[in-house]
């Protein structure tokens, strides 16, 4: 592998926003920047999720084994990789990926075969890849896929439908998905990268740019412009804590009310302090300063979505908004408090009946005692 790979990959990702790779740049000895999945592979390498081989190759067309698939997903989810007993007869604690396999089995991401075998060296099909990713990550319900080689009685039909609807799984030009064909290392990288980094999906990249525009309007306290992204019927809900939002619902402002947000003199019950349970009674301007855009936190525009550091926050949000896509802005906290003063601002988007993204909620979260 080229020693300068990581610097090149980072430069590509930063300046191209995952578009139009420069053909002269080498990523691996056998993956050039004009490879259809070059950016996805570079991203996963940068994240420490995939590796190449000692001879400097990635072997993009090789099939993926069950053990390698679990290891890549395990790294993406930060699963415990401590070597240990897996419970499978053919995966001893000494196996290179025993920790990831044990963790994935505990999380019901993967299952074994009859007589308690895992078959770590068997190859993974495209349909199996969809099913495993569907169990490992959050995908909302979706319409049935229309791939002409996928029948409803195929075990991966629903998983493929969900991944395809989100833009994660794509078929071939002849409208086939080929679910029973072994997935290649390059294809698996594409599926996994799109799952954990939606910027690889054009529609989601556009949404990220919209979210950055909204962040700029929030910083400028221009809620009139924020209102342009809000539904006329649903309004915009604010919640100070993701968990509390489930219990108390936050406060919803109509599209017409939003331009006067900062000048509204009324106190609202936004929720309850997580931990103490004290009421949060504040005017919108006070809520803005203490929770929405807390002056102790810095939220910067993003070039890509990035993996969440607080997955429970997203889990709570998806309970309320199962069809939503979340753009999270994260403040990691300070060394003074060992990062325990972290905060996040989560923009929650849903598609309306016209297929356009609308902002339905802004949900904050933070560490509490």
Image: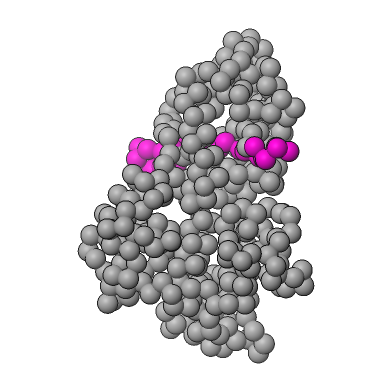
In the rendered image, residue 134, in percent from the top left (x then y), is placed at 63, 62
Indicate the quadrant where residue 94 lies: bottom left
In the rendered image, residue 52, in percent from the top left (x then y), is placed at 34, 71
Q: Residue at x 43, y 61 (%)?
A: 36
In the rendered image, residue 284, in percent from the top left (x then y), is placed at 60, 18
Q: Is residue 349 magenta?
A: yes
Q: Is residue 12 above or below residue 335?
A: below
Residue 193 visible to an observer of this rendering: yes
Comparing 142 with 30, the one in front is 30
Residue 99 visible to an observer of this rendering: no
Location of the C terminus (image quadrant): top right
Q: Residue at x 69, y 71 (%)?
A: 149
Q: Is residue 332 magenta?
A: yes
In the rendered image, residue 31, in percent from the top left (x then y), is placed at 34, 67
Comparing 173 with 80, the one in front is 173
Q: Residue at x 47, y 23 (%)?
A: 219
**Which span of residues is magenta-colored?**
331-356
């Amino acid at each position: 592998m080229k020693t300068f790979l990581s610097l090149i990959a980072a430069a590509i990702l930063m300046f191209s926003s995952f578009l139009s790779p420069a053909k002269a740049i080498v990523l691996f000895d056998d993956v050039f920047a004009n490879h259809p999945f070059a950016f996805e592979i570079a991203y996963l390498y940068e994240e420490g999720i995939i590796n190449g081989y000692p001879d400097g190759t990635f072997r993009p067309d090789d099939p993926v084994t069950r053990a390698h698939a679990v290891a890549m997903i395990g790294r993406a989810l930060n699963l415990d990789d401590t070597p240990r007993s897996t419970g499978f007869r053919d995966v001893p604690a000494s196996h290179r990926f025993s920790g990831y396999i044990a963790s994935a089995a505990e999380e019901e991401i993967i299952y074994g075969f009859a007589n308690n075998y895992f078959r770590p060296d068997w190859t993974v099909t495209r349909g199996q890849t969809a099913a495993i990713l569907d169990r490992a990550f959050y995908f909302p319900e979706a319409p049935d896929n229309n791939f002409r080689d996928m029948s409803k009685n195929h075990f991966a039909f629903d998983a493929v439908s969900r991944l395809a609807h989100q833009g994660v799984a794509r078929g071939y030009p002849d409208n086939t998905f080929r679910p029973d064909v072994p997935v290649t290392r390059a294809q698996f990288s594409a599926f996994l990268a799109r799952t954990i980094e939606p910027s690889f999906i054009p529609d989601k990249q556009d949404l990220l740019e919209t979210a950055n525009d909204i962040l700029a309007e929030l910083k400028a306290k221009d809620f009139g412009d924020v209102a342009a992204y809000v539904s006329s019927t649903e309004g915009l809900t604010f919640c100070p804590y993701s968990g509390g939002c489930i219990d108390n619902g936050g406060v919803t402002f109509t599209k017409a009310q939003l331009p006067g947000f900062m000048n509204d003199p009324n106190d609202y019950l936004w929720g309850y302090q997580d931990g103490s349970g004290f009421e949060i009674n504040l005017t919108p301007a006070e809520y803005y300063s203490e929770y929405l855009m807390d002056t102790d936190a810095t939220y910067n525009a993003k070039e890509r979505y990035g993996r969440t550091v607080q997955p429970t926050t997203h889990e709570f949000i998806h309970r309320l908004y199962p069809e939503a896509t979340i753009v999270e802005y994260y403040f990691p906290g300070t060394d003074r408090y060992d990062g325990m003063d972290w905060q996040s601002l989560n923009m929650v988007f849903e598609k309306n009946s016209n297929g356009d993204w609308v902002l339905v909620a802004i949900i904050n979260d933070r560490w509490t005692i």
